[in-house]
Amino acid sequence: QVQLQESGPGLVNPSGTLSLTCAVSGGSINEGDWWSWVRQPPGKGLEWIGEIYRSGSTNYNPSLKTRVTISVDQSKNQFSLKLKSVTAADTAVYYCVANGWYSLEDWGQGTLVTVSS
Amino acid sequence: EIVLTQSPDTLSLSPGERASLSCRTSQTVSSNHLAWYQQKPGQAPRLLIYDASNRATGIPDRFSGSGSGTDFSLTISRLEPEDFAVYYCQQYDSSPPLYTFGQGTKLEIK
């Protein structure tokens, strides 16, 4: 069971780019298969954003695909999320996750990102 | 896109009682790739069940999952105080790859 920790700015300007990093510890990112980002607006449900394989292959939620980029840095044992052209609707707690068997197994604690000027 | 509908929205029970939560999908879930999560306030979700009926590592055996096709359920055989939380179901679709969640069921103390 790996540990994951999200980091990044807690406040982003509207129309700007949200950037978060997930540090993986207790194991190598190369030992896992897929790594995901999930978000949760305050008081609402969960939305899967996308995933990345250790080799760099990605899959994105079609609803966010035009604005999302997920990347991996094997040398730093971390993966990252960029979401561009953000609006208030992108305000949420963002989680990084280690995928399990067709499920989302190990979760970071989450980080709240607020979109506001 | 497969839509997941959980029922009830809120379930009020007492410790020691049995809880049954439902998750219905708009289309058949491929290979029963249906998972359940528990989320407590201020915490990340915790994987309970994967592939409809397999308990995740460290999950007590009072939690069980069942179902297939479009109709799934999570049962908690005897509620402990720490079980009161929000529960989400989630399915995986491979074409294209997509994880989608139900809206959640809040299990509250009666």
Image: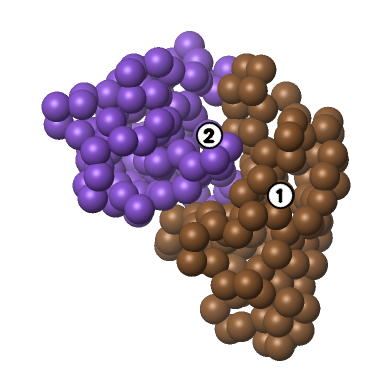
Q: Colour of chain B?
A: brown
Is B103 situated left or right of A104 in this image?
Answer: right
The answer for how far apart the CA atoms under marks 2 and 1 are is: 19 Å
Instruction: Say which of marks 2 and 1 sits in front.
Output: 1
Q: Secondary structure at mark 1?
A: loop
Q: Amino acid at mark 1?
A: Ala
Q: Is residue B63 above or below residue A27?
A: below
Instruction: Using the rendered image, report if marks 2 and 1 lie on a common chain.
Output: no
Q: Residue at x 85, y 40 (%)?
A: B70
Is B56 situated left or right of B68 in this image?
Answer: left
Residue A48: assigned label = 2
Closer to us: A40 or B47:
B47
Is B28 situated left or right of B91 in this image?
Answer: right
Q: Is residue A20 above or below residue A73?
A: below
Q: Amino acid at mark 2?
A: Trp
Task: Say if residue B104 shows up in the picture.
Answer: no
Residue B31: assigned label = none
Image quadrant in which you'd find residue B105: bottom right
Name the residue tied to disc 1: B52
Crowd tier of the residue under label 1, counting other residues whose Cα lies within 10 Å: few below 14, some 14–19, many 20 or above: many
Q: Residue at x 67, y 81 (%)?
A: B79
The chain ID associated with circle 2 is A
Q: Could you say where residue B51 lies in the image, as x and y percent from the top left?
A: 66, 45
Give the quadrant of the N terminus of chain B.
top right
